[in-house]
Image (spheres, rainbow, N blue to C red):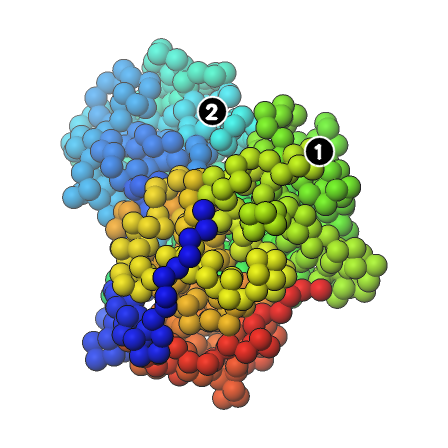
Amino acid sequence: MHRTPRPRLRGPAAALAAAALLGGVLTGGATAQAAPRTDGRLTDLVNPFIGTQNEGNTYPGASVPFGMVQLSPDTGHNTGYDYGENHIRGFSAVHLSGVGCGLGGDLPTLPTTGDVTETDYAKYAAEFSHDDEKASPGYYKVGLKTGIGAELTATQRTGVQRYTFPATDKANVLLNAGQSLHRTLSSEVEILDSRTVRTAITGSGFCQDTKPYTVYTVTHFDRPFTTSGTWKGDTVTQGSRKSSATDARNGAWLRFDTSKDRTVEATTALSYVDAKGAALNLRAEGGRSFDRVERAAQRTWEDRLEGVKAQGGSDELRRTFYSSLYRSFLAPNVGSDVDGRYTGWDQKTHRGKGFTYYQNWSLWDTYRTQAQLLSLLAPRESRDMAISVLRIDAESGWLPKWGYGTVETNIMTGDPVTPFLTNAYQQGLLKGYEEQAYRALKKNADGVPAADSAPVGREANVEYLKDGFAPYIKDRQHAKPGDSDYDHGASATLEYALSDGMLAEMARDLGHDADAARYDARAQNYRKIFDPSTGFFRARDASGAFTGPADPAESEGFHEGTSWQYQWMVPQDIPGMVDLIGGKDAANQRLDSFFAYDKLLDDPAKTAREVWVNGPYAYYNADKYNPQNEPDLIAPYTYLSTGQPWKTTDVVHAALTLFTNGPTGMTGNDDLGTMSAWMVLSSIGVFPVQPGTDTWGLSTPAFERVDIKLDRRYYPRGSLTVSAPGASDTDRYIQSARLDGARQSRTYLTTDDIRSARSLSFTVGDAPSAWGTAPEDAPPALG
């Protein structure tokens, strides 16, 4: 129900009330650290354990940026590692940061001692303590209570393990091919010689069973084992060299004599193509000692993090910032082998020429934040990622929605691939591919995949194109695995309309004027689900009648949210949405109620944790901001369009208090870097307010200065400095802004601004000003 806020504090009183807002997010001027420490590395600030508890679903193990391998411990949680658990089932080779359902966990490997009698990793799991555990980018170490020490590191396509055993002639390494985080359909293991084991693992499932995929591995040890064997089901067979199983436990065990030499090192290479690919990857990236690989991984991460140098701010802020920056580089992941071969979505082998093939596409999440951050900080990789998505269309006949490995899962709804690719186009990453990308997007926007194909695409497009909305149909039988747009017709309509608006911009740029006009008109379809009787968006059934509870906090037909939370997700036309609900005054009253703005000024951190946040999966029955989930990520920036831009800073910095330096320090699932990228961009003060275009909204940075290194191939100036000298808890409101010294009254930048400028500087003060409050200062509607 709509709640009318109490009278607002104004002028000096408002400034005094706001003084406490940042809490630990910004430090007072006299105590602020002036620059990064010179006696340490940026990787020292990263805490990989952030998000490993309370369903952040991150992993603490070893990887390199965008690596195919993420070698990490699994403790029994369905997505891998949970800080609250105290047993490790194995160190497996594949993980995705922050997914909400079981996925990956292939080939959990565990060192043991004594006879091999158990074959279920839940039974032979080793107890451990966090007191004997540490992690940093590219490195993980734990002491098991069995007396064995384990260390992990990685290259792009291999994971390297080092085990330190007690003195024994029964030191074992268990390679479990038959158990994973997902459903393992079949597995094969083969001991090739006294140092080498290979496997093939076919798995299915992510939230629901999906089309199967296969990952191939080869593991090579630095010393020969004394004996070995396999297991299948409950049966352990010494001396056996091969084993295969369907829907059953299956694996290999290798034994070493560590009476004198207590360490054993193993390198596991992956391929999604074939056993040959795994062997080639091992030959190219293996053969080095654990210490050399670990040092190289650390250097790689240091180089990545040095692309953003933040000065000022508390130690807590700097640690959460660099930890978020680290997680932003974990995915998508390399999918091609060193020879360029990869398995396409047609399940055929292809070879990438002139680009690296990437996979793992959580697009409903990443199109809002992470795609834009990577376009700034990793444009060459971002270009290859966009080309990889186009290859999916060319090889399988359709663009992806939520892709894992070599298959479509159809998880989540709407049309997220359109703003992902139009963003790549707007950021200049698709030169030479513009028309190919446009053709694929047009096909996706105007059609529906065939019934016998895996993707669902815009599943409700027939009705949407005819009536202007996707109907909400309860209990409809799903023709394909995954989520259905018909289950979430209201939010699917908003997502389709958003994508139409972004595609219209691309069509106009490329000279497809008739298409641009058609997509511009469709971008207004958000109006078709606006119910004037409630003043909110509302689902409509197949007959066109509004359906579900009239109370917007109890609304139905919205995916992981309510009408309150989705009302601001019209970035293509915020002015039109504001007019629908009665103009700027009415919109600001509704925004203030939505963010509990009065309470926020009194106690931002408490408001964030007790009013906004109600649990990691508490998506429904709420009329307040939910910073833990994707539909609300853009909401704080709505104030930039309603003449009160200072409130964007108030809300953003309150939300930043949810990111802390501990296992529970994530807000919601990280979703392949989505939440982490939100934290990074919001801390810098430059945020993609119209995802899919080149528009960046502005707010007060959380640091006094941030130096961003940019690739000169895409950003000729090579760097951008964002500064706010003297920014503190009290001096936090933008008084003026300058771009390369020229007055900047607009509350947004374009990518061309970033390309042409070297500095964005803010003057801040202790009270809101008139900066950015004129109608022409707001981000414009598209079309």
Q: Residue at x 53, y 40 (%)?
A: 550
Q: Is the C terminus in the top left, top right, bottom left or bottom right quadrant? A: bottom right
Marks 2 and 1, how far apart at CA: 40 Å
Q: Residue at x 67, y 64 (%)?
A: 782
Q: Residue at x 58, y 70 (%)?
A: 779
Up/down of 397 relative to 231, above or below: below
What amino acid is at disc 1?
A: Ser
Under circle 2, the secondary element is strand
How dense is the environment of label 2, judged by Cα within 10 Å: few (below 14), some, or many (20 and up)? many
Q: Is residue 246 left or right of residue 518?
A: left
What amino acid is at disc 2?
A: Arg
Task: Measuring from the top left, give residue 421's x and y in whole percent.
Answer: 64, 55
Q: Residue at x 39, y 77 (%)?
A: 768
Residue matched to label 2: 183
Q: Earlier in the sequence, mark 2 or mark 1?
A: 2
Q: Which mark is residue 543?
A: 1
Task: Measuring from the top left, give residue 175's x and y in whole percent.
Answer: 37, 27
